[in-house]
Image: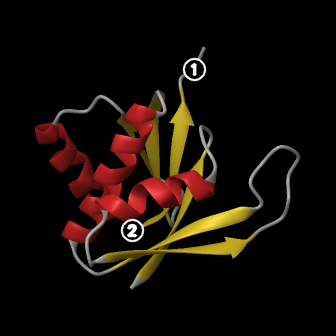
Amino acid sequence: MREIIVESRVCSSAKIEQLLEAALHEGVSLARRGGAAKRGADPSLLIALVGAGGAALGALVAGLLDIAEQARAARIILVGVNGRRVEVPATVSPAELDLFIAKAAELDVERVVLDRAQD
């Protein structure tokens, strides 16, 4: 199992955890860890423990896209261990989602960020 940090610029990690738990399957589990408190921010980190293979990562990404759409976020950003990133629009079609998941698997994702619309 590898750890992927889940961040949000649109809602708290507790809210994301609550929404994700219903959508995820057995290849993904969630944990919260204490973090440094920032003014107005949730001080805990949400960690997704993702099993090997693309199905578990795909389930996490799909679940986060559902949350992004509900929260009116613009996109999710998948960040790899080497700093490379892939931005997935919240309105992505199911066919395009498979392409983004394949790219994410190549990145060795270590962080996923729900990002709000750019005004």
Q: Nearer the viewer, residue 51 or 28?
A: 28
Residue 57 image-quadrant placement = bottom left
Residue 23 image-quadrant placement = bottom left
Q: Is residue 72 above or below residue 17?
A: above
Q: Which residue is mark 1?
A: 118
Residue 86 image-quadrant placement = top left
Q: CA distance from mark 2 to mark 1?
A: 26 Å
Residue density around tag 2, few if under 14, some if 14–19, many if 20 or more, within 10 Å? some
Q: Secondary structure at mark 2?
A: loop
Q: Spot the residue most to the left.
A: 95
Q: Residue 60: x and y, percent?
A: 34, 60
Q: Residue 69: x and y, percent?
A: 38, 33
Of the residues shown, which amino acid type is indicated by label 2?
Asp
Q: Residue 56: x and y, percent?
A: 26, 70
Residue 56 in view:
yes
* Residue drawn at 48 percent across, 33 percent down: 71
* Residue drawn at 41 percent across, 33 percent down: 70
Q: Which label number is shown at residue 108?
A: 2
Q: Nearer the viewer, residue 63 or 80?
A: 63
* Rendered-image quadrant of the C terminus: top right
Of the residues shown, which amino acid type is indicated by label 1?
Gln
Identify the mark nearer the N-term, 2 or 1. Answer: 2
Q: Residue 113: x and y, percent?
A: 53, 48
Q: Secondary structure at mark 1?
A: loop
Q: Nearer the viewer, residue 100 or 115?
A: 115
Q: Is residue 19 above or below residue 52?
A: above
Q: Is residue 11 above or below residue 3?
A: above
Give the left or right position of residue 112, taking residue 59 as reference.
right
